[in-house]
């Protein structure tokens, strides 16, 4: 009987090791959401002064290494591609278990999100990097329609979602070291160039409301930051703004009236193209994102803005 129990225990231990190795090989490693969350968990406790959140606008356009080199500010881009604000809210709840930043920077581009649910790929990129927790499950449930709720546990456990990736696996997947470098801060540069036409939405004064769900989670996020006594800087990084986008942003000012400026501030950097030095012939990768040249300019300018408005540590003279 004792020998049988030992065999069962050994079986489950071996099965666990095998499953762990399969997970390592088959797991998604998207660099537009999952890797950012995985890298966040590796940051030393108390090391993040500025937590940058939101969509790809933030992780492509803000380079934390520039902020560190020029202003001594430690920042991390904890974002995901097209991340809706409800996923950002639960990501923040998860992040606050491990870090207590001195400032939260929130890219508000996805407030224009017209849907209450997201495509599977966006759900995966916003949640699969999270450790198992009630925040992860809540983020998954909020991203699924009523008909899809029965599948929430499949996304939570992950393996049943990515197990079909075995068709894409090569021998090198078993040998490659997929660990992130120690200096990884979530930034993903865009190195191509696309010529853009400068937008002008200065005459757009109309308003377009956010969806009820987006507005709810936007307020919940701001209230959470207020409860934690962390100021929030809402931003729009430079991009080719559309008229309907601007109408949504025009509603933000009204909503922010309930928050003192020392707790929530909004800066639209599409109003500062010239001050930043943006060149529409050389600095964009596409209509939504800056390329490496544009990112360097904006990150340098943004660092000076942070230093102007907020009291943040300067780590340049530290060992």
Image (spheres, rainbow, N blue to C red):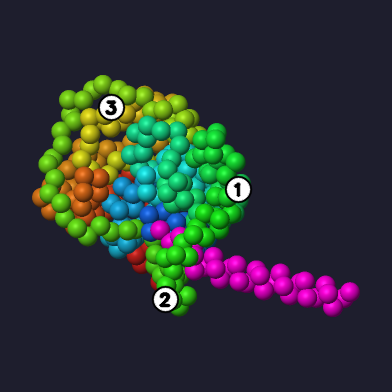
Q: Is residue 35 above or below residue 109?
A: below
User: From the viewer's perspective, is 63 left or right of 179?
Assistant: left
* Residue located beneath label 3 in the image: 247
Q: Is residue 7 magenta?
A: yes
Circle 2/circle 1 CB separation < 8 Å? no
* Location of residue 264 in the rendering, given as x and y in whole percent from the top left corner: 40, 36
Picture quarter with the C terminus: bottom left
Residue 242 in sight here: yes
Q: Could you tell me which residue is drawn at 22 percent across and 60 percent down? A: 191
* Residue located beneath label 1 in the image: 153
Which region shows up in magenta?
Answer: 1-30
Q: Is residue 91 above or below residue 30?
A: above
* Residue located beneath label 2 in the image: 172
* Location of residue 150 in the rendering, given as x and y in whole percent from the top left corner: 60, 41
Q: Is residue 275 above or below residue 214?
A: below
Mark 3 vs mark 2: in front: 2
Label 1 secondary element: helix
Crowd around label 3: few <14 · some 14–19 · many ≥20 (10 Å) = some
Q: Is residue 59 magenta?
A: no
Crowd around label 1: few <14 · some 14–19 · many ≥20 (10 Å) = few
Which numbered disc covers residue 22?
none
């Amino acid at each position: 009987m004792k020998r049988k129990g030992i065999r069962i225990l050994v079986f489950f231990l071996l099965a666990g090791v095998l499953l762990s190795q399969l997970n390592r090989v088959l797991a998604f490693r998207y660099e537009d959401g999952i890797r950012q969350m995985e890298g966040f968990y590796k940051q030393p406790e108390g090391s993040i002064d500025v937590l940058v959140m939101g969509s790809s606008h933030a992780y492509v356009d803000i380079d934390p290494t520039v902020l560190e080199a020029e202003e001594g500010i430690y920042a991390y881009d904890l974002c995901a591609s097209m991340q809706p604000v409800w996923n950002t809210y639960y990501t923040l709840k998860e992040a606050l278990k491990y870090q207590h930043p001195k400032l939260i920077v929130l890219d508000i581009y996805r407030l224009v999100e017209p849907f209450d649910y997201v495509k599977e790929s966006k759900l995966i990129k916003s949640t699969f990097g999270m450790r198992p927790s009630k925040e992860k499950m809540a983020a998954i449930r909020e991203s699924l329609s009523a008909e899809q709720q029965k599948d929430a546990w499949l996304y939570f456990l992950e393996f049943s979602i990515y197990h079909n990736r075995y068709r894409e696996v090569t021998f090198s997947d078993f040998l490659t070291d997929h660990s992130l470098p120690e200096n990884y801060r979530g930034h993903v540069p865009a190195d191509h160039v696309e010529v853009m036409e400068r937008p002008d939405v200065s005459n757009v004064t109309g308003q377009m409301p956010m969806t009820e769900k987006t507005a709810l989670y936007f307020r919940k996020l701001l209230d959470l930051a207020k409860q934690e006594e962390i100021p929030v800087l809402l931003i729009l990084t430079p991009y080719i703004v559309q008229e309907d986008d601007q109408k949504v942003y025009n509603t933000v000012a009204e909503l922010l009236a309930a928050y003192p400026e020392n707790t929530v501030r909004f800066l639209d950097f599409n109003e500062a193209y010239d001050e930043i030095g943006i060149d529409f012939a050389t600095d964009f990768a596409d209509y939504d994102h800056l390329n490496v040249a544009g990112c360097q300019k904006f990150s340098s300018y943004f660092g000076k803005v942070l230093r102007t408005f907020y009291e943040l540590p300067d780590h340049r003279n530290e060992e």
